[in-house]
Amino acid sequence: MLITFLQDFIIFFAIYLIVSLSLNLEHGYTGIPNFGKVLAVAGGAFVAGFFPGRLVAWISNIGTSEYSGLLDYSSITYHTSIVNEVNKILASNAAFSIAVFVVTMLVAGLVGAGLGYLASFPAIKLREDYLAIMLLAMGEAIRVIGHNFSPIIRGNIGALVPDVFGWAGEWRYLAVLFFVGGACILVFFYLQRLVKTPLGRTLRATRDNEDVAKALGKNVISIRMKVIVIAAIIGFSHCCMRT
């Protein structure tokens, strides 16, 4: 029981640490008050609920005789039976499961980049307090859309997420711990490396005195947009692991 608790604790700690590291890049190093971090947290979860189950079902030709294209998740019975079949396929093929996991993270990262750009584009020229409010509104908007637009994850009912670590059997928690912990370590060292480069010094200069950075020829708006996009990619691609 204690080992299971510690494994769960470390997994969730690593996931939230990734979120904190991406937020630290935005606010700690660049001075962007991103109150809408839920945009990445919720968005990654929505991608995990929407994408992998449909992908595996489409590749394996599950349910396509009744529903063409994207699977209809509105029926609870049908949705449950589809995900159960998907889990059986994933449990029998470790390589395929890992590939689905990696592809889901990549798709989440791409979605995060797009939404991060869209969120920052109309607001990046605003003053810090107005920028914070705008990002907060964007984060709340994606939560409302995800919970009420049923084709994504069946609205408030929610969608079952395929178990991409079912192949590990009784060692499932260790497999999840290995992948999530490894991702957390990679993100940590990537950001540590990033902030020690000339770009990192530019980020701190932008945070400390925006006018001085502009006087030195730095495009502050472009820098902020890039940081928001990078942080959104990290948040989306790794928050999808929480589900």
Image (cartoon, helix red, strand yellow):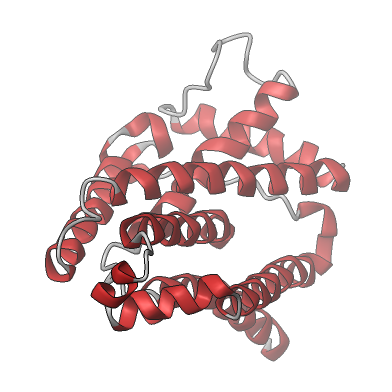
Q: Residue at x 53, y 78 (%)?
A: 17
Taking depth in this image into account, of 34 and 167 the one nearest to the observer is 34
Taking depth in this image into account, of 24 and 78 the one nearest to the observer is 24
**Residue lying furthest front in this view?**
216
Q: Quadrant of the C terminus?
A: bottom right
**Residue lying furthest bottom in this view?**
2
Is residue 206 left or right of 127 when viewed as pictured? right
Is residue 73 left or right of 238 when viewed as pictured? left
196 versus 83 height, above or below: below
Q: Residue at x 65, y 76 (%)?
A: 193
Count of numbered marks: 0
Instruction: Answer with the quarter of the image where residue 76 lies.
Output: top left
124 versus 196 height, above or below: above
235 versus 213 height, above or below: above
Locate residue 186, reporting x and y percent. Answer: 70, 71
Taking depth in this image into account, of 189 and 177 the one nearest to the observer is 189
Instruction: Answer with the quarter of the image where residue 97 lies.
Output: top right
Locate residue 56, reporting x and y percent. Answer: 69, 31
Is residue 221 left or right of 24 when viewed as pictured? left
Q: Residue at x 48, y 70 (%)?
A: 22
Q: Residue at x 83, y 59 (%)?
A: 168
Locate residue 88, reporting x and y percent. Answer: 77, 39
Locate residue 223, reporting x and y percent. Answer: 40, 60
Residue 19 in view here: yes
